[in-house]
Image (cartoon, rainbow, N blue to C red):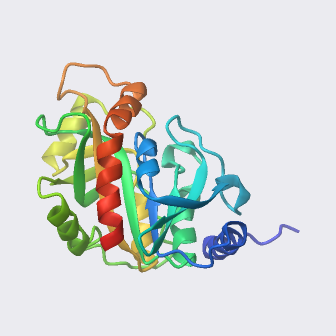
């Protein structure tokens, strides 16, 4: 007889309980998911109170992408305890949508009411040089998938919180906003696909974030999304795309990204 599968929500509760046991932190206030190129920014956030390997928690797997560490860190920022995921599972890894959003559901189960989702992405605006942070105003999910199970209807009208975006702009008045378009990956978008993204209202293209944001909203979390433009999208410039370029742009922008997160996290 086949054993019944654990529901993704029960698995997240188990992971949160194990997290509390291993870190000694009973409850976290805010979660942060760091995307490609953002890893160096974690050092500027605050005092690390605990760090574990993600694979120590039920339902987590090791990092599969360069630029992601596969670690989970608990950081004290002011009077907030921040849960920092130093890697994510991408949809293109083929592990299923539930695996992609498991960190988000774990964060919610750990007490987080707010989540900051970051990513490295391609930009359609030629004025956004590599290393430019852009607030996500909205998204277009081209994966054809959803983390919601069954007849679960969730309003996504203000998915990327206008309140949090306003706070971020108060702290960094020069921050631009854009619509993030998630493609399935792992191949980069073709120039024609990038043109399509622009036609349907996109400003940023990448391979993460939208499924996590939907799961966060389902869990009742407030969401702030920040993209780091690591390269101009295919066809916007005449340069070929390279993941090493993504990581280098992140390293070059690390101090600015760390300072930005260090200012935003304490006030949200």
Which residue is located at x 15 percent, y 52 percent? 201
Is residue 95 in view from this perspective? no
Identify the image quadrant of residue 238. top left
- Seen in the picture, residue 228 relative to 230 is either above or below; the reply is below
Between 208 and 131, the one nearer to me in the picture: 131
Would residue 60 appear left or right of 264 to someone viewing this image? right
The percent coordinates of residue 129 (x first, y second) are 19, 34
| Picture residue at 44% right of the left edge, 61% below the top | 32
Q: Nearer the viewer, residue 125 or 22?
A: 22
Residue 78 drawn at (x, y percent): 41, 70
Residue at 60% across / 51% down in the picture?
A: 71
Quarter placement of the C terminus: bottom left
Q: Position of residue 189 (x, y in %)?
A: 32, 34
Number of numbered discs: 0
Query: Is residue 232 shown above or below 238?
Result: below
Q: Height in image: 175 above or below 185? A: below
Residue 13 visible here: yes
Q: State the quadrant of the N terminus.
A: bottom right
Point 20% across, 41% down: residue: 196
Residue sitting at the far right? 1
* Residue 79, image x, y percentages: 43, 75
């Amino acid at each position: 007889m086949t054993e019944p599968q654990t529901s993704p929500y029960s698995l997240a509760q188990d992971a949160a309980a194990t997290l509390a046991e291993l870190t000694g932190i009973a409850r976290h206030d805010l979660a942060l998911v760091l995307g490609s190129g953002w890893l160096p920014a974690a050092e500027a956030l605050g005092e690390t109170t605990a760090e574990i390997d993600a694979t120590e928690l039920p339902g987590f797997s090791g990092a599969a992408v360069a630029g992601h560490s596969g670690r989970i860190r608990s950081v004290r920022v002011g009077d907030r305890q921040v849960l920092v995921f130093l890697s994510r599972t991408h949809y293109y890894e083929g592990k299923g949508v539930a695996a992609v959003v498991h960190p988000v559901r774990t964060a919610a189960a750990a007490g987080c009411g707010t989540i900051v989702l970051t990513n490295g992405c391609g930009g359609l605006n030629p004025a956004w040089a590599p290393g430019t942070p852009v607030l996500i105003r909205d998204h277009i999910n081209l994966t054809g998938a959803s983390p919601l199970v069954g007849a679960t209807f969730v309003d996504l009208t203000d998915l990327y919180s206008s309140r949090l975006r306003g706070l971020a702009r108060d702290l960094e008045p020069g921050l631009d906003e854009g619509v993030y378009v998630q493609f399935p990956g792992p191949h980069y978008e073709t120039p024609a696909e990038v043109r399509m993204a622009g036609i349907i209202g996109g400003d940023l293209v990448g391979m993460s974030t939208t499924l996590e944001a939907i799961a966060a909203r389902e869990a009742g979390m407030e969401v702030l999304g920040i993209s780091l433009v690591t390269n101009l999208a295919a066809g916007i410039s005449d340069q070929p795309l390279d993941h090493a370029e993504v990581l280098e742009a992140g390293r070059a922008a690390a101090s600015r990204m760390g300072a930005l997160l260090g200012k935003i996290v304490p006030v949200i």
